[in-house]
Amino acid sequence: MPRMTFVAAAAALLAGCGVVHAESHDSGSGSRSFDVHGFDRVSLRGSDNVVVRVGGAESVTATGPNAVLDKLEIKVVDGELRVGREKHWGFNWSSDHEPTVITVTLPRLRAASIAGSGDMKVDNVQTPTFEGSVAGSGNLTIGTLQADSASLDVAGSGDTSVAGSAKSIDVSIAGSGNVDARGLKSERAKISIAGSGDVRAAVSGEANVSIIGSGDVDIAGNPRCHVSKMGSGDVRCG
């Protein structure tokens, strides 16, 4: 196949996959935009970094090494935006290990999750219920959360940090990761730790705490704590 025909066919194939190229070159760094719609959850899988901006029209852009951008796989499955990389067999070039930054804008966010070592930063969330989860060593940061109920789960060594307000929170740690919710004012809390991870929270009402292991819980405010503990972990209430 002539070279120009092959290039034209490849471009048509990428356009059909909903990928729009911008400022792209054969080498160096560039940016891409992705034509995806209909999602209110964001999931990151791998080592890249995601910035989520809530309150605007849906858009997804990525910046980084072109060799890495070529391998990004960004799609919507059942209302969830999944950010990751295609699986390739063969050589792993050095640029494969360089993280990209994916910026996601959407009108409303109900859930954010990480599986891997990548980081996700969310600016502002207003929703009746919110779910945040980390599996691995990645970090989830939520600038401001306003919700009736919020669940925050960590499995592994990753950390979660959140501020704002919620009527009730459910925090679960399995491993050495930490949850810093001192800036999240809540009325009720359920906190469970299995491992060495720590939880910091601010609760004005009832707090049910369960620890198995060496993890610590520090609850500010004027909570009424009910504690179940096995291991060396400590609980500080008020």
Image: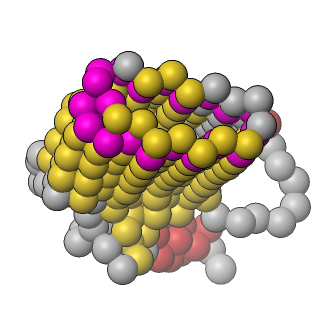
> Does residue 27 show up magenta in the picture?
no
Front residue (pair 180, 77): 180
Give the quadrant of residue 203: top left
* Left or right: residue 90 compared with residue 49: right
* Left or right: residue 147 compared with residue 226: left
Residue 151 can be seen, yes or no? yes
- Residue 34 location, x and y as percent? 35, 59
* Left or right: residue 221 compared with residue 7: left
Residue segment shown in magenta: 203-223
Front residue (pair 197, 5): 197
Residue 4 can be seen, yes or no? no
> Does residue 209 show up magenta in the picture?
yes
Residue 236 lies, with reference to residue 166, above or below; the image says above
Front residue (pair 132, 43): 132
Q: Measuring 33% from the left and 31% from the top, which residue is drawn there?
A: 223
- Residue 17 location, x and y as percent? 42, 74
Q: Measuring 17% from the left and 58% from the top, which residue is drawn there?
A: 128
The figure's colour scheme reads: secondary structure
In the picture, which quadrant includes the C terminus? Answer: top left
| Dominant SS type (magenta) | strand
Front residue (pair 130, 191): 191
- Residue 196 location, x and y as percent? 73, 34
- Residue 12 location, x and y as percent? 42, 74
Residue 49 lies, with reference to residue 110, above or below; the image says above
Q: Measuring 76% from the left and 29% from the top, which residue is drawn there?
A: 232
Residue 173 lies, with reference to residue 28, above or below; the image says below
* Left or right: residue 169 compared with residue 38: right
Give the quadrant of residue 206: top left
